[in-house]
Image (tube, rainbow, N blue to C red):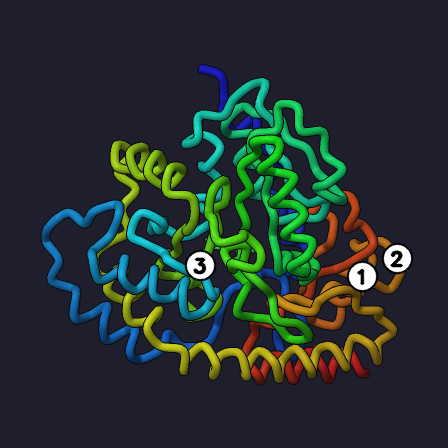
């Protein structure tokens, strides 16, 4: 049998292991700022909803409970400013990574189809294209892409790894171009509620999409905004034809969000207070790390939103990783996100206040 994993790139995080060992040797322990994984508690109201739904013996549905669909449509209208969002415009997914990796396959893309994503990007966009056997292309500006054979265009604003935010006028231009050429736009907006120097706007906002979701899908996740990465709760919203097709495929594939997680997601989506609280934690950590990195000779680029600082000292990212690991601080090399990141590192501010303070001290030494 031909190996499917042969189609995939080497899992990059394995290359970081020796540096992790070095950083772990620091007398005061490692500060791991490499993976953007939440470390703060799951909000109490979310945990309560999860446990109250623990007695869930039956199969959940892929489309979710009516309560979940109401929570999704309500959140899209309240937080994204989207208008007239119906049940047919939303679909729960089992964490957004799963969706990103399998979307090209579930859309029936394959050899001859092209999937485009940003030059510096979350690696799973490419993985998804490769799993489907489709071609992929990295872009600097989507408007410069050749539309021939282009089936799926990924946007990611705010961006992982750079934190860059696309302004509404750029989003509008890309959507107009994609509609003209019949290209599906899928906009990964999982950091949308984490803007620091600018207010990120969704493709579903009427000023961006012109009040129509045709040819548009937005991807959202509860992992970062609600510290729910361990629950696997995310959803897509947008074009009802695309979502209806995906619903059929995903029903056959059994891609159901567990019932207690659906209940937890309802609670999380209905509460903005814990999101504001979590944002303030991240804001303080971001400020501390930014100041310390700049004091240590780094230049921060973009980073106006998301959970990352995109930093450079104009040297190979691996030299930076090695130097910081000796100081007990682990960061992600920029080339994990494409060769264009070879001289940057990505510094996540998903560590406890105590660990962030330790990193700031070490960077200033
Ligand atoms: C840009 C982007 N999209 C999607 C994901 C996946 O998030 P999750 O699977 O937790 O929803 C991540 C995770 O870091 C990400 O950075």
Left-right relation of 105 to 347: left
**In the rendered structure, are the residues bearing label 2 and label 1 in contact, judged by CB atoms less than 8 Å apart?**
yes
Which residue is farthest front?
Answer: 210
Residue 337 in percent (x, y) is at 68, 48
Q: What element carries label 1?
A: helix
Q: Residue drawn at (49%, 43%), measured in percent from left and top?
A: 100
What residue is at 82 percent from the left and 63 percent from the top? 312
Residue 24 visible, this orientation = no
Q: Which residue lies furthest to the top in this view?
A: 1
> Which of marks 3 and 2 precedes in the sequence?
3
Q: Distance between the residues labelled 3 and 1?
A: 31 Å
According to the picture, the residue beneath numbered tag 1 turns out to be 320
In the displayed structure, would residue 309 be above or below residue 161? below
Mark positioned earlier in the residue sequence (2 or 1) = 2
Q: Within 8 Å: ligand 1 and the Cβ of disc 3?
A: yes
Residue that badge 2 annotates: 315
Circle 2 residues within 10 Å: few <14, some 14–19, many ≥20: few
Q: Name the residue under label 3.
A: 221
């Amino acid at each position: 049998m031909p190996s499917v994993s042969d189609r995939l790139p080497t899992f990059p995080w394995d290359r970081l292991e020796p540096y992790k060992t070095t950083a772990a040797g620091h007398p005061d322990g490692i500060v791991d700022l490499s993976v953007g994984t939440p470390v703060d508690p799951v909000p109490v109201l979310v945990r309560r909803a999860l446990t109250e739904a623990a007695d869930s013996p039956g199969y959940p549905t892929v489309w979710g409970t009516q309560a979940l669909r109401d929570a999704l449509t309500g959140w899209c209208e309240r937080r994204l400013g989207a208008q007239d969002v119906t049940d047919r415009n939303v679909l729960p997914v089992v964490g957004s990574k799963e969706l990103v990796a399998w979307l090209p396959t579930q859309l029936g893309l394959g050899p001859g189809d092209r999937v485009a994503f940003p030059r510096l990007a979350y690696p799973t966009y490419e993985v998804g294209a490769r799993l489907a056997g489709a071609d992929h292309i990295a872009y600097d500006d989507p408007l410069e892409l050749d539309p021939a054979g282009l089936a799926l265009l990924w946007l990611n604003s705010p961006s992982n790894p750079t934190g860059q935010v696309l302004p509404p006028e750029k989003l509008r231009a890309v959507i107009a171009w994609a509609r003209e050429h019949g290209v599906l736009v899928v906009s990964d907006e999982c950091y949308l509620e984490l803007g620091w120097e600018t207010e990120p706007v969704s493709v579903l906002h009427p000023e961006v999409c012109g009040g129509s979701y045709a040819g548009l899908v937005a991807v959202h996740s509860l992992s970062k905004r609600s510290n729910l990465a361990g629950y696997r709760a995310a959803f897509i919203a947008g074009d009802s034809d695309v979502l209806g097709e995906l619903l059929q495929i995903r029903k056959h594939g059994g891609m159901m969000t567990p019932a207690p997680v659906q209940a937890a997601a309802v609670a999380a989506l209905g509460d903005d207070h814990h999101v504001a609280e979590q944002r303030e934690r991240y804001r303080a950590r971001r400020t501390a790390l930014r100041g310390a990195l700049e004091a240590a000779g780094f230049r921060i680029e973009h980073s106006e939103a998301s959970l990352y600082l995109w930093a450079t000292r104009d040297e190979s990212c691996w030299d930076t990783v090695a130097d910081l690991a000796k100081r007990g601080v682990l960061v992600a090399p920029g080339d994990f996100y494409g060769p264009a990141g070879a001289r940057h590192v990505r510094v996540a501010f998903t560590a406890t206040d105590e660990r962030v303070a330790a990193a700031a001290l070490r960077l200033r030494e």
